[in-house]
Image (spheres, coloured by chain):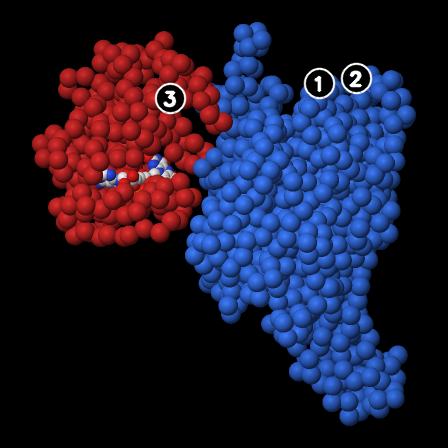
């Protein structure tokens, strides 16, 4: 790790103004991505702005057909939240599938979304649940937010404050874990909304999280796993690495999508 | 059996401190004035070093010194050594390239040591290392085991085609004759995947030099501190042996990787004198991945010949063994004498011939890793036996039984003489525990759920209790492999045992104390075990090869016998009887045929106060030492049965049942033995399903962190069903065979045999990842379409 200045603002405003002044600054949330990168000296920000003391970034709230989660909420908090479990059980289950207990008790929803790791789980939930990413400056539709691996619509110094998810009528997340890292080798989030079905795929795409249009179309017609017969995602758009090549990933997307639909349907 | 004697499941004495965080590991030692070392490592797999400019680093804050290979050479510090000479078929010695602790002229793998920075803090040392300017001439690299001799890339000048040795063992002509008359020949191609050892505690070293006494001290994560001292003094020349104290305190696992003498510890001792400060180095996990000696990495073609009665009549094996970029301390012995002599397995095979080509590549050195050679041999034999049985349409268990060795001693064609065993007894017990007779029913039940169920056997044998010194000497070992012990009885009757064995997870503080408790009739809390310090223990060969029970404890038993003999002399004086009438039983010295007796502790006190005998008749005190040199290897053996269920849609393999029936001879502590079996199986399952070190073609280690290198987790394993059979080992006084490596040896073929059984398809490599299994399942489903 290189030396850095550590800041701990007490309010969102203070955090934003620090970010405006401090050179080469990074926000610190759970630190589960940022700190390992710093320890390996792959990142060396001069200033770290810890978001941990900011009350505005906490909380979970249901209002009408949306559920809104503060950016600094930990995965374990989302997984165990009564509101989330009641409104979108699939989201709580997804949070419970992240990493291991250490990770779930440090990592945050805001950090995960800001980071947009191509194997992270939350980005799939955001797309499938038609989420809105709320920052200290604006509201961004999830469809516009994720812009390729480790790339988002966030501007320099912009802070995610909340994420609000649309409550679907049925949803489920099926994850095939990378056996080593436990991130998603392939994760498929399906959600049936009043107007249409959304299917989001993480872990698999060579350009990060994406919506599987053909699957959405098929499932919007009939929300059954059979509807997915003959529908697949193209191998050409799949990532390939030592754990899984593109053919296997493309196959797994189909398997996980079917399993997710079955589970969502079973939930009723 | 007493409550704390041999055979009792005594709780581990050492666990109190380990589980409460009171263990004391090398990194816990901080010496006054200590400075920190950081090694600049090569980012290239293969490069000529045009120049190293340490100047910019020297002026960085906190920097005390920066050294390169030239500085070591100027001080006449020798290179690291390989302590086992292997001769090729043509009689020529193996081709050992130079192995300087800090590179000279060339770097040969990613992680190779270029320079060391010593600074006030670790962060400063790291900062300064980044400032060192190295001008590399990057060369093409060779990483692939099978390609090593077929490339223009040359790792060492001494070996133009990267061959270290072309070695062989067995009876070639008889083997060819057996194949000529065979009814059936089964062939197999196998890769034994490269593994990273990953003990929970990474390596560490603190070097210290005392200008007053000219004494050096090295705290190091070692499985064998005396061997480290011997090598550092006699071969590398860092310090004279009598001036160097090596301390290996609590060590958090080794699995072989801490046997070897590495560059970092060498440099720490040497640099401590140069900079006049204690110097500490602690590996981080990334460094461990890159520079701990890796394990396995064989490519093998093997063939098994059977006659018309389904009897195995011949085995021939050709193996290419990747030794990495340099020959690590015992590397050359692993794919040779620790490998080929086990190729007879549990079977009566009259003709065996094995050729092994050791090769250099631009990868981390490869050396002993839990099982060392024996897992590789077992994988060959047990995969081939399974495949043969399938090709002959025979039940794999019964095919094995028909070919088991039943008469002992049994001399194999590959220089081993098995002393004792009852392989069929282990098989019967394993079949029973595994509920083999209902397997078909379970298979059908799985099929109804769309799952594929398979069962796999592994009838493994290993050679442990390493090893008779004369025998290993004749095979090229640079050292003897006996063990030493000293039993010191205090005036109060408590006992300290000084042992040359080293515990780094095995529980010696408990099992060794159980032996003393058993023999001397004293409670185990009256016994302490002292190990891991060359100033306290005179000499020892350390712990590896499941040798601490069979060899280390035998030395203790021998010393205890001497203590009892001396005690009898003391008792004869005190009890006023003739020495021949003194008996020692249940912790008391008594006069035969009388009720006169004294407790062990009372006699100990008498030995020290020496009031009841004259110094002319008897020396005061009660302390005895012994060296024990085994007369043969020991041969633990057993049967493991693995039952898997595969999800053909995803390729996920779930281990449903695991049965392990092992014959370890006499067991000192069944709880600790079970723990060793569990850990071994976990490691073996890791190799079979999850672990594999992967280098890309340029020589970068892709699996250089736990993000990509998958270690087994509890959730990957079922609850193990462990059973034992016992044939006491006839060649040592305790009847012990050893248990430390069995699981890691037995497990991989059991898993792969189960998967291939489930798939009906033989071609699957380790690790059998979901992707690999899914692909094999596809092929098995559609044999035509896949071609
Ligand atoms: C061993 C391990 C296993 C894991 N497994 C999984 C898994 O299975 N699935 C999964 O999805 N994830 C996994 N993760 C990732 C983890 O769950 C976190 O989601 C991730 O580390 C990011 O969240 P964080 O709170 O730790 O963010 P940090 O590491 O603190 O920050 C990450 C990045 O986001 C920025 N940032 C953080 N918060 C904000 C904000 N509010 N506004 C703007 N920018 C912000 C930071 O500046 C930084 O650039 C794993 C991590 C580890 C270490």
* Residue at 9% across, 35% down: A63
Image quadrant in which the N terminus of chain B is located = bottom right
How far across and down, in percent of the image, does residue B253 sit?
58, 52
Can you tell which mark lies on residue B391? 1
- Where disc 2 sits, the SS reads strand
Residue sitting farthest toward the left:
A64
Callout count: 3
Q: In this rendering, is residue B307 above or below B277?
A: above
Q: Marks 2/3: CA distance?
A: 49 Å
Q: Which residue is mark 3?
A: A206
Pointer 2 and pointer 1: residues touching (CB < 8 Å)? yes
Examine the rendering and report whether any part of residue B318 can be seen: yes
Can you tell which mark lies on residue B184? 2
Chain A shade: red
Crowding at mark 2 (Cα within 10 Å: few <14, some 14-19, many 20+):
some
* Residue at 83% across, 53% down: B469
Image quadrant in which the C terminus of chain B is located = top right
| Left or right placement of residue B64 versus residue A118 in this view | right
Chain ID at mark 1: B
Are labels 2 and 3 on one chain?
no
Q: Nearer the viewer, residue A207 or B651?
A: A207
Chain B shade: blue
Are labels 2 and 1 on one chain?
yes
Q: Marks 2/1: CA distance?
A: 9 Å
- Where disc 3 sits, the SS reads loop
Examine the rendering and report whether any part of residue B284 can be seen: no
* Residue at 19% across, 17% down: A196
Residue sitting farthest toward the bottom:
B611
Chain ID at mark 2: B
How far across and down, in percent of the image, does residue B742 sit?
66, 44
């Amino acid at each position: 790790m290189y030396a850095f200045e550590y800041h701990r603002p007490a309010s969102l405003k203070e955090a934003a103004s620090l970010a405006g002044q401090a050179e080469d600054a990074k926000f610190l949330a759970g630190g589960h991505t940022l700190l390992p990168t710093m320890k390996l000296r792959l990142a060396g920000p001069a200033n770290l702005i810890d978001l941990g003391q900011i009350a505005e970034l906490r909380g979970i709230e249901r209002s009408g057909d949306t559920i809104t989660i503060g950016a600094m909420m930990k995965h374990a908090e989302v997984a165990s939240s009564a509101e989330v479990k009641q409104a979108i059980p699939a989201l709580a289950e997804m949070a419970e599938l992240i990493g291991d207990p250490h990770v779930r008790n440090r990592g945050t929803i805001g950090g995960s979304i800001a980071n947009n790791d191509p194997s992270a789980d939350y980005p799939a939930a955001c797309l499938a649940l038609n989420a809105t990413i709320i920052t200290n400056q604006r509201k961004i539709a999830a469809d516009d937010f994720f812009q390729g691996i480790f790339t988002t619509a966030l501007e320099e110094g912009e802070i995610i404050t909340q994420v609000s998810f649309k409550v679907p009528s049925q949803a489920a997340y099926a994850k095939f874990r990378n056996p080593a890292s436990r991130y998603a080798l392939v994760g498929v989030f399906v959600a049936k909304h009043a107007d249409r079905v959304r299917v989001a795929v993480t872990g698999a795409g060579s350009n990060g999280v994406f919506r599987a249009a053909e699957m959405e179309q098929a499932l919007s017609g009939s929300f059954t796993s059979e509807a997915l017969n003959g529908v697949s995602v193209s191998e050409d758009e799949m990532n390939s690495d030592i754990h899984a090549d593109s053919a296997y990933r493309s196959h797994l997307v189909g398997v996980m999508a079917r399993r997710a639909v079955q589970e969502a349907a079973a939930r009723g | 059996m007493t409550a704390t004697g041999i055979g009792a499941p005594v709780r581990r004495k050492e666990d109190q401190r380990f589980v409460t965080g009171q263990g004391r590991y090398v990194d816990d030692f901080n010496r006054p004035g200590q400075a920190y070392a950081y090694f600049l490592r090569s980012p290239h797999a293969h490069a000529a070093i045009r120049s190293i400019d340490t100047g910019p680093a020297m002026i960085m804050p906190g920097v005390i010194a920066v050294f390169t290979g030239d500085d070591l050479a100027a001080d006449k510090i020798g290179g690291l050594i390989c302590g086992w000479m292997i001769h090729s078929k043509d009689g020529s010695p193996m081709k050992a390239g130079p192995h300087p602790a800090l590179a000279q002229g060339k770097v040969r793998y990613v992680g190779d040591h270029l320079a060391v920075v010593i600074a006030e803090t670790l962060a400063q040392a790291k900062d300064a290392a980044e400032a060192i300017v190295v001008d590399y001439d990057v060369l093409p690299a060779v990483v692939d085991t099978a390609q090593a001799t077929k490339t223009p890339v040359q790792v060492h000048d001494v070996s133009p085609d990267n061959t270290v040795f072309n070695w062989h063992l067995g009876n070639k002509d008889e083997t060819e004759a057996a194949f000529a008359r065979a009814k059936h020949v089964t062939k197999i191609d196998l890769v034994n995947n490269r593994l990273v050892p990953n003990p929970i505690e990474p390596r560490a070293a603190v070097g210290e030099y005392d200008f007053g006494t000219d004494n050096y001290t090295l705290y190091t994560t070692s499985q064998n501190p005396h061997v480290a001292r011997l090598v550092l003094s006699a071969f590398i020349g860092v310090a004279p042996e009598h001036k160097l104290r090596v301390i290996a305190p609590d060590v958090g696992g080794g699995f072989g990787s801490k046997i070897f003498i590495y560059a970092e510890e060498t440099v720490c001792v040497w640099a401590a004198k140069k900079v006049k400060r204690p110097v500490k180095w602690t590996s981080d996990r990334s460094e461990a991945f890159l520079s701990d000696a890796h394990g396995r990495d064989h490519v093998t073609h093997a063939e098994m010949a059977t006659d018309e009665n389904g009897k195995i009549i011949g085995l021939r094996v050709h193996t290419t063994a990747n030794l990495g970029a340099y020959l690590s301390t015992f590397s050359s012995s692993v794919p040779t004498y620790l490998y080929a002599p086990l190729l007879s397995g549990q079977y009566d095979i009259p003709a065996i011939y094995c050729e092994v080509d050791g090769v250099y590549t631009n990868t981390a050195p490869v050396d002993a890793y839990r099982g060392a050679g024996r897992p590789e041999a077992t994988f060959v034999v047990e995969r081939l036996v399974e495949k043969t049985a399938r090709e002959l349409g025979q039940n794999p268990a019964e095919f094995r039984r028909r070919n088991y060795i039943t008469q002992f001693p049994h001399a194999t064609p590959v220089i081993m003489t098995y002393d004792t065993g009852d392989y069929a007894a282990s098989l019967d017990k394993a079949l029973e525990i595994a509920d083999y007779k209902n397997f078909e029913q379970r298979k059908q039940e799985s099929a109804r759920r769309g799952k594929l169920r398979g069962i796999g056997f592994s009838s493994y044998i290993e050679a442990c209790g390493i090893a008779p010194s004369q025998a290993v000497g004749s095979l090229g070992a640079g050292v003897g492999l006996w063990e030493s012990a000293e039993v010191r009885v205090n005036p109060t009757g408590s006992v300290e045992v000084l042992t040359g064995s080293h515990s780094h997870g095995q529980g010696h503080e408990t099992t060794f104390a159980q032996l003393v408790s058993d023999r001397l009739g004293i409670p185990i809390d009256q016994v302490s075990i002292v190990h891991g310090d060359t100033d306290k223990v005179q000499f020892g060969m350390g712990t590896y090869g499941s040798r601490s029970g069979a060899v280390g404890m035998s030395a203790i038993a021998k010393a205890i016998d001497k203590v009892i003999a001396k005690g009898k002399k003391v008792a004869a004086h005190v009890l006023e009887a003739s020495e021949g009438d003194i008996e020692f039983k249940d912790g008391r010295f008594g006069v035969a045929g009388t009720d006169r007796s004294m407790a062990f502790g009372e006699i100990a006190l008498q030995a020290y106060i020496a009031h009841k005998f004259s110094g002319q008749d008897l020396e005061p005190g009660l302390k005895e030492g012994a060296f024990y040199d085994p007369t043969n290897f020991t041969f633990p053996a057993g049967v493991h049965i693995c039952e898997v269920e595969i999800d053909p849609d995803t390729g996920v393999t779930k281990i449903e049942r695991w049965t392990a029936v092992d014959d370890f001879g006499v067991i000192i502590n069944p709880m600790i033995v079970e723990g060793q079996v569990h850990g071994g199986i976990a490691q073996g399952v890791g190799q079979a399903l999850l672990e594999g070190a992967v280098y890309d073609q340029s020589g970068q280690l892709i699996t250089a962190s736990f993000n990509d290198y998958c270690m087994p987790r509890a959730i990957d394993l079922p609850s193990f069903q462990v059973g034992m059979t016992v044939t006491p080992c006839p060649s040592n006084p305790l009847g012990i065979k050893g248990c430390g490596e069995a699981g890691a040896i037995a497990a991989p073929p059991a898993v792969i045999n189960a998967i291939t059984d489930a798939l009906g398809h033989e071609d699957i490599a380790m690790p059998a990842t979901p992707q690999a299994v899914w692909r094999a399942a596809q092929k098995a489903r559609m044999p035509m379409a896949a071609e």
